[in-house]
Image: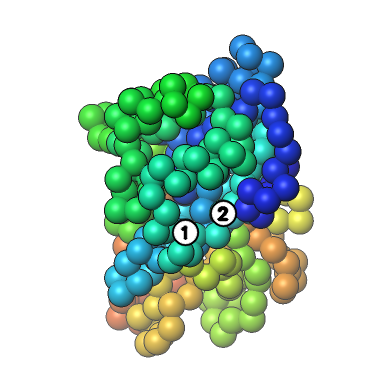
Amino acid sequence: MTIYEGVEGFPRLNYPVVTSGTFDGVHLGHVKILRRISEIAKANQGQTVLITYSPHPREVLFPNEPKIHLLSSFEEKSKLLEKNGIDHLIKIPFTTEFSQLSSEEFVRNYLVARLNTKKLVIGYNHRFGKNREGSFEYLSENASIYGFEVEEIPKQDLDHVAISSSTIRKALGSGKISEANKFLGRYYTMTGKVVTGNQLGRTIGFPTANLQIFPENKLIPADGTYAVLVDLLQKKYKAMMNIGYRPTVNGFNKTIEVHIFDFNQSIYDEIVTIHFIKQIRNEVKFENIERLTAQLSRDRDMALSILKSY
């Protein structure tokens, strides 16, 4: 897969099959679109093209609203898109100026003039252009003028719930990891660097690696304890993770700590990727360290039980 910063210099393709959107998380609804454009491209000896945007359009369109937390970094998204058959990935800077383009300007200046689009595939209720005026109906009515075909993929439901990035963010924010994973079609992941903590865990038999997650706008699931898998030093380990403020020891700052089972190496500054499997419990303030330690032992047993088939 080739990645382009904007459309300048994009090569002239014979049969580009195009889709566009933020594709945050590359969930099952997105995968349906990606499979379809790959299918069309193969049938026509063409290539797949995906236009995405950075930063997230909501940050530019609604600057006074709380900053959106993303399901995937650009690097994570790129890898998932390549895995799902994208040949060309175009990242367009989403600026205030870009947001003022009309749907017609976007189609003519980008899809036609720059990309030579032959087939455009969009998701259910996808909108584009200033004030979201562009729609599937608009594209269908004008497709012959622009010289390409257009197809809309119906919304994807799972257990009668429409799959969307917003739905997944809500599930993660509530600690509903299994639900989020179901909509993603994979485990939700976070990546970070191991940094120095207060080293309390090692004094009670549960040494932890404190993580600094990147990028900063990556969505962190709800506070609590989780059964997780850890990618570290080219191996995968079973572990349990705690996210929260450590109320039992009067913590003031949120920490993200992982206790890796059967592991005792020093890993400061190493990069770790966490795969969330299931939440074990919410964060709780215990009466004392002894009660906390006893609960951590139960958490470990629960995590090992959850992870026994992994």
Task: Residue at 48%, 75% (x, y): give it.
Answer: 255
Q: Quadrant of residue 128?
A: top left
Q: Earlier in the sequence, mark 2 or mark 1?
A: 2
> Are the residues flagged by discs 2 and 1 in contact, CB closer than 8 Å?
yes
Foreground: 95 or 184?
Answer: 95
Task: Residue at 42%, 32% (x, y): give it.
Answer: 122
Point out the residue furthest to the left here.
160
| Secondary-structure class at tag 2 | strand
Q: Report which residue position mark 1 lands on.
A: 98
Point out the residue furthest to the top here.
43
Which quarter of the rendering shows the C terminus? Answer: top right
Give the colour scheme shown: rainbow
Residue 254 shown left or right of residue 37 in the figure: left
Residue 218's disc number: none
Does residue 261 sit above or below 188 in this rendering?
below
Task: Residue at 58%, 67% (x, y): give it.
Answer: 214
Which quarter of the rendering shows the N terminus? Answer: top right
Task: Residue at 61%, 12% (x, y): give it.
Answer: 43
Graded by Cα atoms within 10 Å as few (under 14), some (14 to 19) or many (20 or more), the crowding at tag 2 reads some
- Looking at the rendered structure, the kind of residue marked 2 is Ile
- Looking at the rendered structure, the kind of residue marked 1 is Phe
Residue 219, position in %: x, y?
44, 61
Q: Report which residue position mark 2 lands on.
A: 92
